[in-house]
Structure formats: C-alpha cells, structure tokens
C-alpha cells in the first residue's frame, strides 16, 4: 500500500486539503492529542509540529490553548501557504518554517526552547523505519527536559496479511524506536479506523506518546 503526493504543486495541495477535512475519527485523534497537551505541564509553551499540512490540528490547538506559541515545519511551500491562510487570526503566536526532515539538520531551522513536538499523518511519508528513527532521535535532542512527543500517524496492523509501504510499520516497532531514541513513558493512546480485510491508505492510524525525562530524573511519568 502506498500513495505518491505532489505537495509542491499548489493546486494539488489545495485539492488534497479540501478532500481530507477531518472526519469524526480524525477529530477524535486531535482530541486525544490536545487532551494530553493540556494534562501534561509543558516545560515551555512552544509547540512544534512536523508536517503542518493545511494546519487543521494547529488551528484547533491555538484556539484551545491561548498560552501556546506554535511553529509548523513543512517541506511544501503550498502547504505552508494554506497554513498561513488558516492561522492568520492567531498572528504573532504562529511561526511557519520551510524545512525537509530528510535534508540536513532540520532542527537548526526551528526556534528554541521546545516544550512539545507533535505530528499528524506525516512521518509515514518519510518512507522508511530508519528515517522515522532518525526523526525520533532528532526530536529527543530538540525537546526540553520534561517535554513530550505526540505522533498521530498511519501504522501497519500487527495482524495484517496485506503489504504496506516501508514508512508504515507496527505500533510495537514505533515504541521500540522511541525507546532507542531515549524517550520514556512510551505508549499508544489510541487506534482509529482499523481495517484488516480491505484497508485503504486512509485506514489504520494510532497516537503514540513519549516523554523526555528532565535532567537528573529517571522513572515513569
């Protein structure tokens, strides 16, 4: 399973954004992530999103959390333009940054400190476990101690008989990669639209949570 995107094309990006407005299950993923961001005290109110897309999650976050400063990173200029349109009402609380997770040290492009890193339906497009592992390690290095990572992304079901693209792999494998990157408290907060018999590219996504320990502290959150 897999799909090729043409996110550098403005017409394609806008059509994709119009076709994939959040459905109720996707709103449930957003709610899960927003709830965690509210319950967990962040070491800094800056939230970084990897793959802002048309800013559906960012809009909800900024409305719900007036204390948050948001930065969205995306490799697609057309998507950044769509995000700028949607997030214009939030003014100076928003920074949008052009950057490619597959090119160079993307962490040097973003503002610091960072209290939380989030992503929705983006990291699977990196195309390989190794790239996701690198991004997880980069996130751990970038986050302040006490910060959290929330990744809502497409996954490969553990009990599937179907082939999936290399960028989609199982929840346990994600948790292993998060552990290898140095994160603690790794867990899956939810799983939506599970489909084993006739999956499409829009099925099977989960919310993964991990914490970066504060310096000098060890143990579960």
Image (cartoon, grey):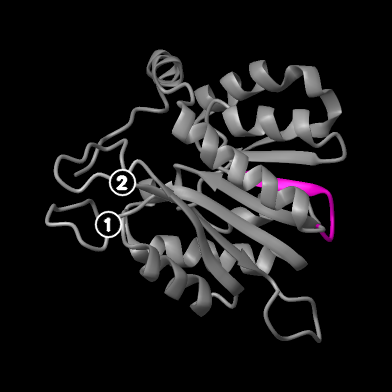
Does label 1 or label 2 sit earlier along the sequence? 1
Displayed quadrant of residue 133: bottom left
x, y percentage for residue 168?
Answer: 31, 54
x, y percentage for residue 101?
Answer: 50, 51
x, y percentage for residue 206?
Answer: 43, 51
Q: Is residue 4 above or below residue 78?
A: below
State the quadrant of the N terminus.
top left
Q: Is residue 149 above or below residue 37?
A: below
- Determine whether, in the image, residue 52 is placed left or right of residue 204: right
Q: Which residues are magenta?
A: 42-49
Which residue is rendered at x = 70% and y = 84% of the image? 219
165 part of magenta stretch = no
Q: CA distance from mark 1 to mark 2?
A: 8 Å
State the quadrant of the C terminus.
bottom right
x, y percentage for residue 126?
Answer: 38, 51
Q: Nearer the viewer, residue 65 or 81?
A: 65
- Determine whether, in the image, residue 56 is placed left or right of residue 144: left
- Determine whether, in the image, residue 142 is placed left or right of residue 22: right
43 part of magenta stretch = yes
Displayed quadrant of residue 182: bottom right
Q: Is residue 93 above or below residue 103?
A: above
The numbered mark at residue 157 is 1
Dot 2 falls on a residue whose secondary structure is loop
Evaluate whether residue 74 shows in this view. no
Dot 1 falls on a residue whose secondary structure is loop
Q: Nearer the viewer, mark 1 or mark 2?
A: 2
Q: Which residue is mark 2?
A: 194
Which residue is rendered at x = 53% and y = 37% of the image? 28
Q: Are marks 1 and 2 in contact (CB under 8 Å)?
A: yes
């Amino acid at each position: 399973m897999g799909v090729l995107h043409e996110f550098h094309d403005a017409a394609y990006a806008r059509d994709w954004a119009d076709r994939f407005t959040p459905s109720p299950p996707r709103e449930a993923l957003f709610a899960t992530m927003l709830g965690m961001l509210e319950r967990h005290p962040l070491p800094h109110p800056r939230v970084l999103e990897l793959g802002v897309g048309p800013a559906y999650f960012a809009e909800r976050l900024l409305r719900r959390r007036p204390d948050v400063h948001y930065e969205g990173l995306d490799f697609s200029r057309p998507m950044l333009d769509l995000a700028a349109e949607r997030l214009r009402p939030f003014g100076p609380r928003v920074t949008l940054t052009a950057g490619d997770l597959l090119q160079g040290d993307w962490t040097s492009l973003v503002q610091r400190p960072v209290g939380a890193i989030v992503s929705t339906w983006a990291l699977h497009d990196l195309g390989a476990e190794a790239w996701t592992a690198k991004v997880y390690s980069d996130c751990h290095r970038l986050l302040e101690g006490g910060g959290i990572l929330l990744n809502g992304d497409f996954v490969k079901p553990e009990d599937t008989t179907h082939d999936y693209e290399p960028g989609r792999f199982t929840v346990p494998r994600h948790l292993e990669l998060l552990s290898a990157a140095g994160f603690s408290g790794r867990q899956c907060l939810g799983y939506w639209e599970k489909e084993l018999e006739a999956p499409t590219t829009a099925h099977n996504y989960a919310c993964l949570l991990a914490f970066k320990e504060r310096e000098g502290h060890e143990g579960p959150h």
